Image (cartoon, rainbow, N blue to C red):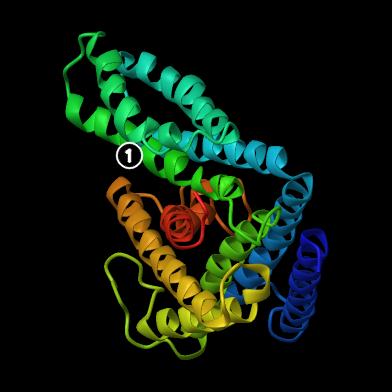
Amino acid sequence: MTPHAEFLALMAGVLAILIVASIAGAILHRRFNADGMNATIENLNARIVAWWAMVGLLGLALLAGRIGVLILFAVLSFAALREFLTLTEKRRGDHWALAAGFFVILPVQYILIGMDWYGLYSIFIPVYGFLFLPILAVLRGDTDAFLNRVAETQWGLMICVFAASHVPALLTLRIEGYEGKSILLIAFLVFTVQFSDVMQYIWGKLCGRRKIAPGLSPSKTWEGFIGGTLTASLAGAGLWWLTPFTPLQAFLMALVVTQLGFFGGLVMSAIKRDKGVKDWGHLIAGHGGFIDRLDSVVFSAPIFFHLTRYFWSAV
């Protein structure tokens, strides 16, 4: 099949899953939640509605090609960075550094990816961004909690911009025999990681008993983690035809990214607990903020990108 046909086949499968989930949610609501008091069913239906919106948005961006994906993730990075830094301690002395982060570093990172300048976009934020942001902050002369303020801004850029930008960076990979299909790698990555999140939730609700980190994320259990990552990895193996991987390689790659996604979610949960909030934001019904949806993907994207580039890319 052509890349376009393969993508449409994947989207058809995802839409079929969403339709089945929507019907199941409606039946559960009618039978067990007519009064709207069952929090679990309400949460499930809110997640399904949010998934319709997110799948539609991502599908349009992928169909638009490289520019559409770059614009989508640049906007998501901007929104996620805003959510992240809203919860951090900031002072007047941080204004120059914040402006540089939002309006210089973020767009330049995505422009470099659009230019396919790997040698620079791979180090731009963790080297040049991290060195020059403290200089901008220190020039304002405000040293109160200086290290904490600078580190929080740097960490926000690392997670919300640098790591997230590795999703569209997959489009720059040149893999022999896979020319023009790199956009399908994004579909594979996002689907497996997000499907793992859904299946961890379902397995956790069905048979979750032993909590992994009860003081950090009480809803995450070993049963949910193992069941969700294995189920998503098997689904990833079934999608090997979207990728340059063999079925076994697709399973192993999916296993790596789903586990990274899980632990990325734990790290972001730890930051939320430190800041005393439940969600990063409330812009996506049933899902919290943008970071609440991106956390799994951004932790897995750089590793997925570099593994694919090292073992399969011709560059």
In the displayed structure image, the side of residue 190 where residue 298 appears, left or right: left
On the question of residue 202 being in view, the answer is: no
For the residue pair 89 and 68, the one nearer the viewer reads as 68
Residue 315 is situated, as x and y percent measured from the top left of the image, at: 49, 49
Q: Give the quarter of the image for residue 155.
A: top left
Q: Residue at x 31, y 54 (%)?
A: 273
- In the rendered image, residue 177, in percent from the top left (x then y), is placed at 65, 62
285 relative to 160, above or below: below
Q: Is residue 86 above or below residue 273?
A: above
**Residue at left 74%, top 61%?**
52
Q: Which residue is mark 1?
A: 155
Q: Is residue 97 left or right of residue 21?
A: left
**Which residue is located at x 40 percent, y 22 percent?**
98
Question: Farthest residue in the bottom direction?
Answer: 207
**Amino acid type for the residue under numbered disc 1:** Trp
Residue at 81 percent across and 63 percent down: it is 2
Circle 1 residues within 10 Å: few <14, some 14–19, many ≥20:
some
Task: Please name whichever residue, 313 or 55, is drawn nearer the observer in this view of the structure.
Answer: 313
Question: Where residue 30 appears, x then y in whole percent?
Answer: 77, 81
Depth check, front residue: 128 or 221: 128
Residue 85 quadrant: top left
**Does 193 sit left or right of 285 as displayed?**
left
**Secondary-structure class at tag 1:** helix
Q: Nearer the viewer, residue 25 or 63?
A: 63
Q: Which quadrant, please, contains the N terminus?
A: bottom right
Residue 161 in the image: x percent, y percent?
A: 46, 38
Visible residue check, residue 176: yes
Q: Is 215 placed left or right of 220 in the picture?
A: left
User: Across the whole image, how many numbered discs are drawn on residues?
Assistant: 1
